[in-house]
Amino acid sequence: MSTKTIQMEDALHAYYLNATLRETEVQKRLRDETAKLSHGHMQISPEQGQFMTLLIEIMGAKKTLEIGTFTGYSAMCVAKALPKDGRLVACDVSEEWTSIGKRYWEEAGLADRIELRIGPAAKTLDRMIENGETGDFDFAFIDADKLGCDGYYEQCLILLRAGGLIAIDNTLWNGKIADPAIVDEETVAIRELLEKVRDDQRVTSSLVPIGDGLLLARKR
């Protein structure tokens, strides 16, 4: 037992992955290709991806959202846990990065579950709300521009059903949120979002220290 979350040094982290990670060969190749990109650090960790797969299965989620798709690894982690008639609406602004993911989605047999929408996510979500999809979604993953996360959170709350789950990435922000001397716009935005969700009576929440921090908020 421990009264404090254990710190993951390299040796323990390597053991952790070796002992617990169940990743398909297609996922592994997508992750490896992404790691070679100049923005490869934007990819979620494999253990976080596996955790998200488990969340989707536990929830029995069928209709899901992703805000910020990058090269599609997180989308694959969500889509593989959906039933055959399940759906993931993946929102991103980059055709270049998402084109990488599309190749692997096809190879994994998941392309028919993923609906990619290219364009500003805020506008995409607004259109979905206007089209009457309020309360239709089971799960939403937010991994996009940090200054926009508060707005995405509010839009996703509208689109989620009661009992639906929002997961927000990078909420430990490589430890920068704990340093009061760091006051750049993105860091401040994450701090403010954490405080907002903590005090938000519309949700029950927990910040899970996996990857770069995954904030979970269940809509009441």
Image (tube, grey):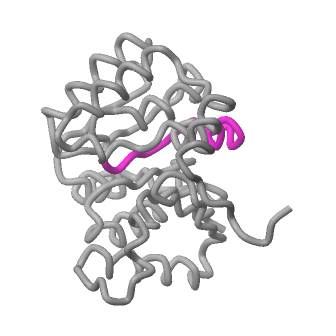
Near-viewer residue (163 or 166):
166
Tell me the quadrant of the picture where the C terminus can be found.
Answer: bottom right
Residue that sits furthest to the front in the current view: 11
Q: Is residue 194 above or below residue 102?
A: below
Query: Residue 212 appears at what percent x and percent y?
Result: 45, 57
Picture quadrant where residue 170 is located: bottom left
Q: What residue is rendered at 56% in x and 52% in y? A: 9
Asked whether, in this view, residue 86 is left or right of residue 193, the answer is right
- The residue segment tinted magenta is 54-68
Picture quadrant where residue 84 is located: top right
Q: Is residue 135 above or below residue 172?
A: above
Asked whether, in this view, residue 121 is left or right of residue 51, the answer is left
Near-viewer residue (170 or 84):
170
Query: Residue 62 appears at what percent x and percent y?
Result: 57, 35
Report the number of discs.
Answer: 0
Query: Residue 17 appears at what percent x and percent y?
Result: 59, 34
Near-viewer residue (30 or 18):
18
Residue 108 painted magenta: no
Q: Is residue 73 above or below residue 201?
A: above
Q: What residue is rendered at 52% in x and 58% in y? A: 214
Q: What residue is rendered at 59% in x and 53% in y? A: 8
Near-viewer residue (211 or 66):
211
Residue that sits furthest to the right in the current view: 1
Tell me the quadrant of the picture where the N terminus can be found.
Answer: bottom right
Q: Is residue 31 above or below residue 64?
A: above
Query: Residue 183 appears at what percent x and percent y?
Result: 27, 85
Q: What residue is rendered at 60% in x and 76% in y? A: 202
Residue 55 painted magenta: yes
Asked whether, in this view, residue 148 is left or right of residue 129, the answer is left
